Image: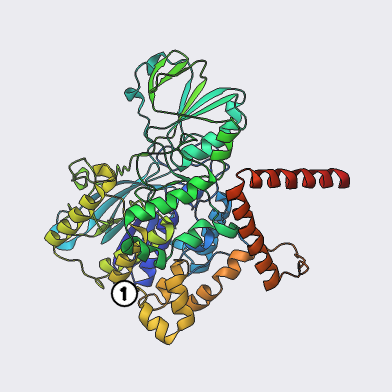
């Protein structure tokens, strides 16, 4: 008889958990409190308590090839950075393709998850659910996969701001924000500089009279595009680049990356620069924020010191009067009210997780929490790998080390992060590729790059030097997918498909030759010699060329 698994939530992690259960011969039952799949990616005009929420204009920060499920590539015609509605459509395609819908019970809320009296022997759980009509039902499960997400309970730190009770304007959280219509012609302060804070501040600045972005620490801001207009993650998240992080001095790498981004816009000049180095924490991904600052539509401000009626005083002593609204983009609290309170065994009240998956306070590790991790890459493939590992553990196909060893490993990982983060964040943060590979090794699907280079060099070279796409974890081992090689070979075609919508004519040859190159080098050498003898030589020549160019342009216009 198949072991029964409770999957809590039918979002991106819940859906792949259902499939992973089926792959390992387990019997999944998914409980979803709403009437549809999608979780975070299901847009609603009015947010529902206890559910994730997003704004209307949200576009993904990771590209489609980097964030898809490992055995289900995104449709080729999808844009590289999708609107949230297309992400939801992709999840629907996934559900239809793997026939997952019949395993989901909609409009059923999990009220409580508690270990059974014989938990130390059986590892079983008693789950109490409540249907839409209020009917309660008890179930017994052999394992629990918590996939309810961590963006459901917003944090609004009003008590930390003196004078907030005197503020006459409106206070809200990004969880409530849908669009900028309500802020038209107003003066608005956005608090918090994560990805949501940057997006919301930019959007509000297009309609508000004044927009201020208040940040305690600042942030490094990067765009979605790399060189030649290719997706940044496609170009940067690669095994070779990750290897360089370990081979080269970190200070040198920080200097190189910071210099590259400061060439686009000086973070110090724009009031963005934080105290940490760029590789020490996740950057903010935003294409428009620096431009809005340059246009004067958005002003950077330090942390708020206090409120005085409709005025806001910042830490640098500057006071802005006539503020109509404050939007707090201050994050979320990872809360699971249906779980036993004893799971939060950390010194800061956090849940200590082995490999960010299994709670260490349990006598029998038959419960897994997915997605409670911060990585510098796409979260969805990570959650899929977490689900693949957890379901194999529940099925008895993989075994965990003794509890003492798991505690030791967890504490070591947390200490390594303490120099960059507070204790709560340190328990969740991990390096993307090493963490992905560590889970893949547990499952038995980490690609053997040397073997691939020797046997299938076309694949091996792409895995080593190419983008860190999830398909490589379906090349061999449990869950092997026959289409993985083809998916790797055609990933650049899918990237290019939505861009190539217009025939582009070939440019005529300019007749450029090696003689032209040599002549150009001589001209540059001569210009340098003249510049040394006459310091104003280059400036005068540039001015002359500019005047000639402008006169020709005017004569042709």
Residue 93 placement, left or right of 301: right
**In this orientation, which residue lies closer to the viewer: 384 or 93?**
384
x and y percentages locating residue 117 in the rendered image: 15, 53
- The relative height of residue 409 versus residue 304 in the rendered view (above or below) is below
Q: Is residue 443 visible?
A: yes
x and y percentages locating residue 41 in the rendered image: 50, 49
Residue located farthest toward the left when viewing the structure as drawn: 404
Disc 1 crowd rating (10 Å Cα; few below 14, some 14-19, many 20+) is some
Q: Identify the residue under disc 1.
A: 444
Residue located farthest toward the bottom when viewing the structure as drawn: 455
Residue 187 placement, left or right of 13: right
Q: Residue at x 58, y 31 (%)?
A: 205
- The relative height of residue 229 versus residue 1 in the rendered view (above or below) is above
Instruction: Name the quarter where the C terminus is drawn.
Output: top right
- The relative height of residue 134 versus residue 376 in the rendered view (above or below) is above
**In this orientation, which residue lies closer to the viewer: 332 or 6?**
332
x and y percentages locating residue 363 in the rendered image: 15, 57
Q: How is the image coloured?
A: rainbow
């Amino acid at each position: 008889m198949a072991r029964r698994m409770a999957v809590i939530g039918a979002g991106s992690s819940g859906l792949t958990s259902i499939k992973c259960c089926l792959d390992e011969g387990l019997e999944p039952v998914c409980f979803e409190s709403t009437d549809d799949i999608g979780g975070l990616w299901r847009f609603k005009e009015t947010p529902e308590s206890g559910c994730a929420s997003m704004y209307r204009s949200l576009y993904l920060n990771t590209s489609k090839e980097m964030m898809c499920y490992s055995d289900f590539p995104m449709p080729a015609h999808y844009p590289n950075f999708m609107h949230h509605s297309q992400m939801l459509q992709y999840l629907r395609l996934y559900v239809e393709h793997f026939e997952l819908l019949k395993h989901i019970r909609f409009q059923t809320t999990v009220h409580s998850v508690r270990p059974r009296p014989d938990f130390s022997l059986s590892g079983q759980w008693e789950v109490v659910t409540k249907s839409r009509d209020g009917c309660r039902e008890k179930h017994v499960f052999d394992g629990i996969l918590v996939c309810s997400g961590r963006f459901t309970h917003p944090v609004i730190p009003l008590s930390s701001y003196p004078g907030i009770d005197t503020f006459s304007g409106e206070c809200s959280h990004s969880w409530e924000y849908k669009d900028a219509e309500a802020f038209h012609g107003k003066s608005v302060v956005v608090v918090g500089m994560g990805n949501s804070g940057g997006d919301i501040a930019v959007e509000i600045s297009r309609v508000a009279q004044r927009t201020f972005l208040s940040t305690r620490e600042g942030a490094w801001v990067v765009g979605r595009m790399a060189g030649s207009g290719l997706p940044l993650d496609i170009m940067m998240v690669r095994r070779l680049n990750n290897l360089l992080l370990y081979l080269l001095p970190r200070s040198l790498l920080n200097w190189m990356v910071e210099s590259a981004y400061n060439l686009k816009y000086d973070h110090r000049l724009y009031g963005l620069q934080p105290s940490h180095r760029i590789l020490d924490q996740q950057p903010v991904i935003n294409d428009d924020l620096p431009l809005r600052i340059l246009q004067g539509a958005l002003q950077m401000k330090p942390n708020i010191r206090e409120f005085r009626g409709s005025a806001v005083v910042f830490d640098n002593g500057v006071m802005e009067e006539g503020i109509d609204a404050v939007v707090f983009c201050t994050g979320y609290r990872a809360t699971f009210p249906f779980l036993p309170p004893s799971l939060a065994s950390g010194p800061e009240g956090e849940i200590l997780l082995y490999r960010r998956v299994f709670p260490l306070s349990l006598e029998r590790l038959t419960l897994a929490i997915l997605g409670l991790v911060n990585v510098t890459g796409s979260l969805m493939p990570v959650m899929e790998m977490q689900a693949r590992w957890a379901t194999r553990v529940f099925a008895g196909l993989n075994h965990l080390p003794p509890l003492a060893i798991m505690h030791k490993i967890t504490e070591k990982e947390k200490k390594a992060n303490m120099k960059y983060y507070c204790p709560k964040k340190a328990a969740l943060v991990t390096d993307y590729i090493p963490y992905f590979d560590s889970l893949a090794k547990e499952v038995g699907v980490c690609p053997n790059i040397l073997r691939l280079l020797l046997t299938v060099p076309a694949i091996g070279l792409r895995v080593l030097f190419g983008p860190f796409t999830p398909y490589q974890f379906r090349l061999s081992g449990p869950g092997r997918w026959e289409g993985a090689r083809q998916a790797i070979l055609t990933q650049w075609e899918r990237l290019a498909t939505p861009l190539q919508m217009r025939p582009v004519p070939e440019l005529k040859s300019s007749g450029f030759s090696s003689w032209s190159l040599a002549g150009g080098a001589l001209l540059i050498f001569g210009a340098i010699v003249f510049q040394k003898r006459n310091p104003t030589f280059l400036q005068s020549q540039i001015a002359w060329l500019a005047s000639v160019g402008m006169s020709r342009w005017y004569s042709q216009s």
